Image: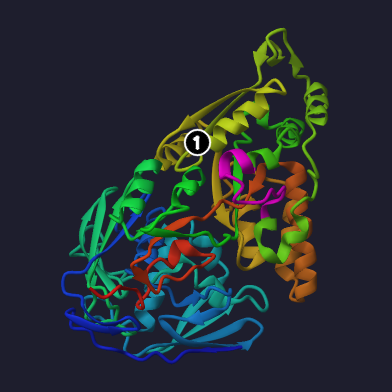
Amino acid sequence: MLLGAVITVMGCDGKEATTSSGTINTKNQQLVVAGQEIAASLDPVKPLTSSYLRNIGAAEALFQVDAKGAVAPSLAESATEIDPTTWQIKLRPKARFWNGKAVDADAVIASLERSRALDLQAKPFLDDLTFTKSDDYTIRVKTKRSHLQVPLNLSYYQTVIHNAEAKHDAADTMDLTGMYKVVEFIPKQKMTLEINGNYWGKAPVIPKIVFEEISDEQTRVLSALSGRSHVTLNIPATGLARFEDSKAARLSATPAANTQTIYLNLSKPQLNDVKVRQALSWALDRNELVVLAAEGQSIPVTTWLSSNPAYAEAKNAVYAKSDPEKAAQLLDEAGWKKGSDGIRYKDGNPLTLRLMTWGGDKALGEALQNQWTKIGVKAAVQHGDYSLIQTARKSGDWDASIEAWNTFGDELTLLTGQYAPEGSANFGGYNDEETKKLLSQLAEASNPAARHELAIKINERVAQQAPVISLFPRPQITAVSKTLHGFEDHFRQFENVVNASLSFDPK
C-alpha cells in the first residue's frame, strides 16, 4: 500500500489573504476556540495534552485521517508496505520543528520512543512497532504481527511528533511542528498561538488563535451565541434548542466513533462479582439515557466496539433490552437482598456505588443513579474535574467512572488497550482468560474476515463479563460561527478543529 500526498507551500505575511470570499485584511484577526478543558501541561506525553495541541493546530502526527476515514500522509510524505511485517516511511525533507531543527529520521524516532516510554496512552499504538533509520529521511518499521496498518497507528494524537531534546515546560522551550506556534500559556485557562512562519505545508490565513477553557456548559453556550468564540467545543445536548434561530452560530454534530462507557473498579468487593456487574447493565434503560443525557442526539449501544460503523451489528448484543427483573434476580443470586428501605444488603453491608463524572456527563450520572436506585443500589454521583478521576484511579479509591474512548482504528490495538491486563485504558483491572485467548488469536489473524469475527467475539465476551458498561456514542456537538468558513465536520473532531483553510467573512 502506498500513501502519498502533494502539498503546495504558500506564503503568508499576516496582512492580506485571498480566500473564496475575497481579499481581506487579516492583520488583527484572531480565532477564538473555547472548550470545556484545555491542557494542564505543554508536554505532549502528559495525559491528554497531545489531543489539545493537535486539535488547535500546534502538533502533527506522521499521518492523519480524513473526514471519510481514509488515512493520508501528514508529516510523512508516503508509506509503503514492503512485506507483511515491514513498512517504509518517507519523511518530508522540508519539514522543520519550530526552532528550525529538521524533522528527520533521528528526530522522529526519538519522539516516538519518548512517547512510548512516558505516555501510557501511546503504548497501544507503538508497542507492536520497532523503528530503525534507513537514511536521513526514511524510517523502516517492523511489526510484531502481519499486515498491521502502521499509518493508522501513527495517526493518533498520542503519536504527535515533538522535539525530544526540548524541555516542553514553557511556551518558549516547547518545540513542535504545527502550522501554529504557542506563544502564551496559562494552564487550564488560555493558550495563545501565532502562525509558524517556517511551516512546511499550506500556510494558514488567520494569524492568531486564542484557545480558552470555559468549564461551565451554559457559559460556553453563551460564548457561542454571542459570537465571542468562533468555534465552541463540547456544546451540551441540553443547549441545542438555543441554536435553532441563532444568527451567530451553526451546529456541527457529526457522529463520533466512540462509546460512552462506565468503567468499573473490579478490586471493589461488590464489583468483583460478575453477577452484580451484569445486573448493573441489565437494569439500564439506554433509550431513556439517550433522551435524558443526550437530548436524543445519539443511539443506544450495549457493547463497546459497536459505535464503530464497521461493527454496528453488535450494538444490541448481550443486553438486547432493559430488564430490571433480570437484574433483580442476579442480585438475589449474588446474595444481595432488598431491605425495608429499598436498598440491597449483604452481610449487613449496603450495595453502594460511587460514580465519578466530569465535563458534560453530570446529567448522565444522575440518570444512571436514578435507574440503579430502582433495583436497590445505593448510588451516588461525584461530579468534578477529570483530574479527580485520575487521582482516584491512582489511589484505587473509586467505584465507577465515565469516559468515551475512540473505537475507530486497528481492532487489536483498540481492544488490547481496553481489555488486556496491561492495557492503558483497562482502568478497572479486567483480567479474563477467555478474553486473553481471543486477543492472542486476533494478534495472529491476518484475514480481514477472521479479524472481524474475532473482534466481535471479544466485544461480546467483554459485554458478558461486564467490566465496563456501554451506553451510547457520546454526542460530539460543536458550535461554529457563521462568519467562519472552511471548518470541516469530522468524526475525529478532537484533532481536526483547526485547518489552514479557515477564514472569516471579509469586512
Q: Give the quadrant of residue 506.
A: bottom left
Residue located beneath label 1 in the image: 362
Name the quarter where the C terminus is drawn. Answer: bottom left
Q: Does residue 95 sit above or below 234 in this rendering?
A: below
Q: Is residue 130 left or right of residue 309?
A: left
Q: Is residue 413 magenta?
A: no
Magenta span main SS: loop
Residue type highlighted by circle 1: Lys
Q: Nearer the viewer, residue 127 or 355?
A: 355
Give how far across and how far down residue 136 sits, in percent.
Answer: 37, 89
Q: Give the quadrant of residue 436.
A: bottom right
Residue range (magenta) = 290-304
* Callout 1 crowding tier (Cα within 10 Å): few <14, some 14–19, many ≥20: some
Q: Give the quadrant of residue 94.
A: bottom left
SS label for mark 1: helix
Q: Nearer the viewer, residue 24 or 68?
A: 24
The colour scheme used to paint the residues is rainbow
Q: Nearer the viewer, residue 442 or 357?
A: 357
Name the quarter where the N terminus is drawn. Answer: bottom right
Q: Is residue 294 magenta?
A: yes
Could you tell me if residue 116 is visible in this image? no
Q: Nearer the viewer, residue 299 or 40?
A: 299
Give how far across and how far down residue 344 sits, in percent.
Answer: 71, 17
Give how far across and how far down residue 269 sits, in percent.
Answer: 65, 27
User: How many numbered tags mark residues here?
Assistant: 1
Q: Residue at x 42, y 42 (%)?
A: 386
Give how far across and how far down residue 379 sits, in percent.
Answer: 60, 24
